[in-house]
Image (cartoon, rainbow, N blue to C red):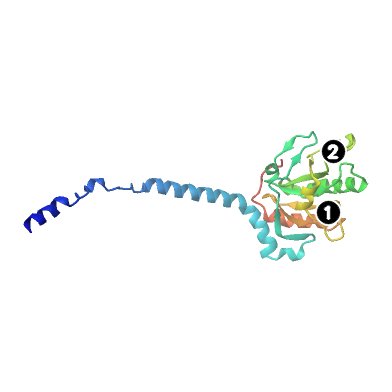
Amino acid sequence: MSGSNSSARDAAPPLESPVALTVHSLPDPALSAQKRRGRWGMLMVIIVCAAPVIASYFSFYVLRLSGNAYGELIMPTVDMPAQLSLTDLAGQPVAAESLKGQWLLTVVQEAGCDAGCEKQLYAQRQLREMLGKERDKLDKLWLIPSDGPDAPPLRPELQQAVSQGVPVTVLRAPRAQIEAWLKPGAGHALAEHFYLIDPMGRWMLRSPAAPDPSKVKKDLDRLLKANAGWDRPGR
């Protein structure tokens, strides 16, 4: 029996050394605190940038100024398509992101631009001027629907007209992309309205067809006064 016990002891596997156990390093408290500060800093930047726009929406949606709006508020707002293919009049590509940062009073008109189009462009220019000290918060945008690469040019006299004073930003985009983003009122065409795009690139207001400029101005006044902290100069 004693010999048997001795053999069992001899056959027992050796115990693992405690030194062989894996030890995971603990997180560095200083590094974790730095990451938290970075996240909070980024959040604060986003809040500061968005605050003026939020104030405008607060005025319309919470304080019920929307009940007095002349135009139709778009609920929910419609984001600018990320893949919106824009080109300038020279055919050079323009990033959609470059349109953000300002309120955009937008018209959608063909390159041929008939008398009704010219009247609307004139009203667009006058509306911006009528805003007085608030006008630098608003840019004028003309979107020209394009059906292919061979887009017709603007008449020289028209191109000169939209370049006077603070120029209109004139950009071409595929017709299907514009129609997927902006919508006319029932029974109307895209060219009959003004479309207001907020500084985040969201379509949020549509004027009635053949709008009264003085009433459109009242809508713009309400938005821009609530948006007093937004003072980025025009593009």
Q: In this view, does 201 lie to the left or right of 171?
A: left
The spot of residue 171 in percent (x, y) is: 78, 41
Q: Is residue 223 above or below residue 169?
A: below
In space, the residues marked 2 and 1 are separated at their CA atoms by 23 Å
> What's the amino acid at mark 2?
Ala
Determine the secondary structure under disc 2: loop
> What's the amino acid at mark 1?
His
Q: Name the residue under label 1.
A: 193
- The label shown at residue 151 is 2
Closer to us: 209 or 21:
21
Q: Nearer the viewer, mark 2 or mark 1?
A: 2
Q: Is residue 130 left or right of residue 50?
A: right
Query: Cβ–Cβ below 8 Å for labels 2 and 1?
Result: no
Closer to us: 152 or 108:
152
- Number of labels in the image equals 2
Q: Residue at x 81, y 47 (%)?
A: 175
Closer to us: 64 or 109:
109
